[in-house]
């Protein structure tokens, strides 16, 4: 097989260009063009849980079994039926599979992959994860800003972006938004090319794509593969999984790897695959698509498996018999490949590369490095998040409108609170509702990390940024400003409608308290939601938690009357600290028995006539520390919850 492969690949590798004309790589750690990727004795197993509770068992399932092969510069397709292991193999080669349960070697030009291989290679995921609210050019600018070295000037980066746009045929839509579920954007093919462009910014020598034709019509799929073919002719090694391509796409392949049940059915030049299967007794009918034919053979379809078995009358019966012997047939095809000259010649080449590996172990990079600094990453993540907020304002505008509406409704219901016995009840009720609203409106924060989970995982693995940069960038650009804006609007509307204490200090203390409660509640939302994949589950957990906290806020039950073995729960209640602070701020110095000299007359011994009496009855300390200790507690809870959210992101399983 080596001679055949030489005929296919040597002319391509001899071009030795930089992928994009006039676009030299500025990364000293990038690979030379014409990279050859080889994989040796790849086994991959996963642990699968079955059963319930006490009867639960952990079984080991083998996904890939003794996979060997070589991928040279050109189009290297991994083909197979659903569940055959093609995506798993692609992830293993791209170093994006969980190393637990994985064995075998993957070499680049005979040397082990460096630790930052995920950063220097390109990987296009099956579901496009570009930011839909940004334009094509802005997405490419984000990739260039974070993945290209800081030694490159902005002019050089913009030149590279423009050349990628021209190479991918995106010039006409370069300044158009990619599009979201709410706004119309570029076509599916242009979106896919944008995803490819995000990876081409670093000019990688090896590009991985997971089913690049998924979701595209036949014309767009053909256009994407023609683009990849042009790129491969420039000396780039392109490896991709694909399910069932049409013939015009299949004939573009240089190398073909057929997988079924985690085993290799064929690995070699794509144009020699038909002759190989014919030698095994499987002949492709005239005008049949080779890709369909190969899948028919692997799946045991009777019309393609055994030659001279084409009797129409017995077709149904033969199909049933074939399905029963599907597993033995796969084993038979796999064994035929192991005994073929293709496998022997591939094995000989792999042995040579393994010998080179022993001499090159010292070149392995020990540390994962980033192209840019923490603050550079922070700036660009915050900038993109802010653009995303402005580009998709529906949720933000809706939140502001609801805040204004609620403020007006509450102001109308509790309008102009009086300083009498009913004023005590109304004040206690409306202050509780203000805190209640701050907590439940913060539930929307669960979407901050859940919606962008796939985007975050892909960009983090690809070396765009550190977890800390992403975390603080999202907080500074999204969470902090939105919570501050809605709190200021809500406080300004309700405070003066309600007729609360008309003192400047009291007004700002109320606003500050509501803001601290909003930040603490939002932080708890992030701590619960970080790492989750479903927004509804995180929202449900948040609502249950807040309802439980409301019981210990101090309105529904006097906290001094709770039995000792339950009273400690009040210290975990966010509303309790906020409610104590706003009550201290509002009731202190108030007189609810107008016209009565409370100090001289003792007729109010069984009634509450002053704010101080009410606060003492609630168990609230009247000293200044009785006010500010609540803010300290809220600040501590905010820091603790944010730390939990950050650690969950940091240790989030980032491998497939």
Image (cartoon, helix red, strand yellow):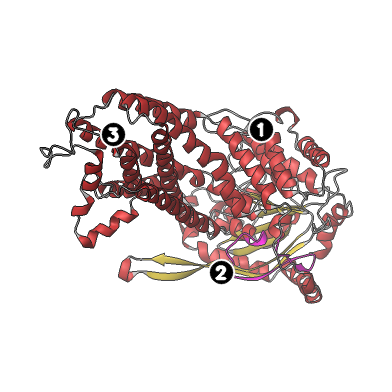
Viewer-closest of 314 and 480: 480
Above or below, comparing residue 391 to residue 265 in the picture: above
Q: Which residue lies at the image location 40% right of the left edge and 33% below the top edge?
A: 507
111 is within the stretch colored magenta: yes
Quadrant into which the C terminus falls: bottom right
Q: Is residue 69 left or right of residue 333?
A: right
Viewer-closest of 579 and 256: 579
Q: Which residue lies at the image location 41% right of the left edge and 66% below the top edge?
A: 49
**Residue hosting label 3:** 430
The magenta stretch is 92-116
Above or below, comparing residue 218 to residue 378 in the picture: above
Check if mark 1's residue and mark 2's residue have beta carbons within 8 Å. Answer: no
Gap in angstroms between the C-alphas marked 3 and 2: 55 Å
* First along the sequence among labels 3 and 1: 1
At label 3, counting other C-alpha atoms closer than 10 Å, the crowd grade (few under 14, some 14-19, many 20 or more) is some
Please, what secondary structure does the residue beneath circle 3 have? helix
Viewer-closest of 363 and 384: 384
Gap in angstroms between the C-alphas marked 1 and 2: 39 Å
Q: Is residue 74 left or right of residue 328?
A: right
647 is within the stretch colored magenta: no
Viewer-closest of 638 and 258: 638
**Residue hosting label 1:** 135
Gap in angstroms between the C-alphas marked 3 and 1: 45 Å
**Residue hosting label 2:** 100
Residue 293: tell me if it is visible: no
């Amino acid at each position: 097989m080596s001679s055949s492969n030489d005929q296919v690949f040597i002319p391509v590798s001899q071009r030795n260009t930089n992928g994009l004309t006039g676009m030299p790589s500025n990364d000293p750690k990038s690979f030379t063009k014409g990279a050859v990727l080889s994989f040796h004795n790849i086994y991959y197993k996963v642990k699968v849980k079955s059963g319930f509770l006490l009867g639960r068992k952990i079984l080991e399932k083998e996904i890939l079994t003794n996979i060997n092969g070589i991928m040279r510069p050109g189009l290297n397709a991994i083909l197979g039926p659903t569940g055959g292991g093609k995506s798993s193999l692609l992830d293993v080669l791209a170093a994006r599979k969980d190393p637990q349960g994985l064995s075998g070697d993957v070499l680049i030009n005979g040397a082990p992959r460096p630790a930052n291989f995920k950063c220097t290679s390109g990987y296009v995921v099956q579901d496009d994860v570009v930011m839909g609210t940004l334009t094509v050019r802005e997405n490419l600018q984000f990739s260039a800003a974070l993945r290209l070295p800081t030694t490159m000037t902005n002019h050089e980066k913009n030149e590279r972006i423009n050349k990628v746009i021209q190479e991918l045929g995106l010039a006409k839509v370069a300044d158009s938004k990619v599009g979201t579920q709410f706004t119309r954007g570029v076509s599916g093919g242009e979106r896919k090319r944008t995803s490819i462009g995000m990876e081409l910014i670093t000019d990688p020598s090896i590009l991985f794509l997971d089913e690049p034709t998924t979701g595209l019509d036949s014309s767009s799929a053909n256009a994407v593969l023609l683009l990849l073919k042009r790129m491969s002719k420039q000396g780039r090694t392109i490896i991709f999984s694909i399910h069932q391509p049409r013939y015009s796409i299949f004939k573009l392949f240089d190398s073909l790897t057929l997988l079924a049940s985690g085993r290799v059915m064929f690995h070699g030049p794509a144009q020699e695959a038909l002759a190989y299967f014919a030698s095994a007794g499987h002949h492709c009918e005239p005008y049949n698509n080779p890709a369909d034919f190969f899948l028919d053979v692997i799946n045991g379809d009777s019309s393609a498996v055994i030659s001279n078995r084409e009797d129409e009358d017995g077709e149904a019966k033969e199909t049933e018999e074939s399905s029963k012997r599907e597993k033995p047939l796969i084993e038979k095809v796999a064994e035929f490949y192991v005994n073929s000259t293709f496998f022997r010649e591939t094995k000989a080449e792999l042995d040579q590369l393994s010998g080179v590996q022993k001499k090159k172990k010292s070149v392995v990079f020990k540390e994962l490095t980033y192209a840019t600094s923490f603050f550079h990453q922070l700036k660009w993540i915050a900038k993109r998040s802010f653009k995303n907020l402005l580009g998709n304002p529906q949720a933000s505008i809706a939140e502001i409108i609801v805040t204004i509406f609620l403020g007006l409704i509450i102001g109308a219901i509790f309008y102009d609170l009086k300083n009498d016995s009913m004023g005590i009840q109304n004040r206690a009720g409306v202050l509780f509702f203000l805190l209640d609203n701050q907590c439940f409106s913060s539930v929307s924060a669960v979407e901050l990390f859940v919606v962008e989970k796939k985007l975050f995982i892909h960009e983090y693995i690809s070396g765009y940024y550190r977890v800390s940069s992403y975390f603080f960038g999202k907080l500074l650009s999204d969470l902090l400003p939105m919570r501050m804006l809605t709190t200021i609007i809500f406080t300004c509307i309700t405070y003066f409608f309600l007729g609360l204490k008309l003192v400047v200090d009291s007004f700002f203390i109320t606003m500050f308290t509501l803001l601290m409660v909003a930040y603490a509640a939002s932080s708890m939302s992030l701590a619960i939601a970080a790492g989750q994949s479903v927004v509804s589950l995180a929202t449900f957990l948040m609502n249950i938690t807040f309802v439980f906290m409301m019981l210990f806020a101090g309105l529904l039950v006097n906290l001094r009357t709770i039995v000792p073995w339950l009273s400690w729960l009040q210290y975990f209640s966010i509303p309790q600290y906020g409610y104590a602070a706003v009550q201290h701020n509002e009731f202190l110095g108030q007189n609810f028995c107008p016209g009565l000299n409370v100090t001289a007359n003792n007729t109010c011994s069984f009634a509450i006539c002053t704010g101080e009496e009410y606060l003492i009855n609630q168990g609230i300390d009247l000293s200044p520390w009785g006010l500010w200790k609540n803010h300290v507690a809220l600040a501590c809870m905010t820091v603790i919850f944010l730390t939990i959210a950050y650690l969950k992101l940091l240790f989030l399983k980032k491998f497939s």
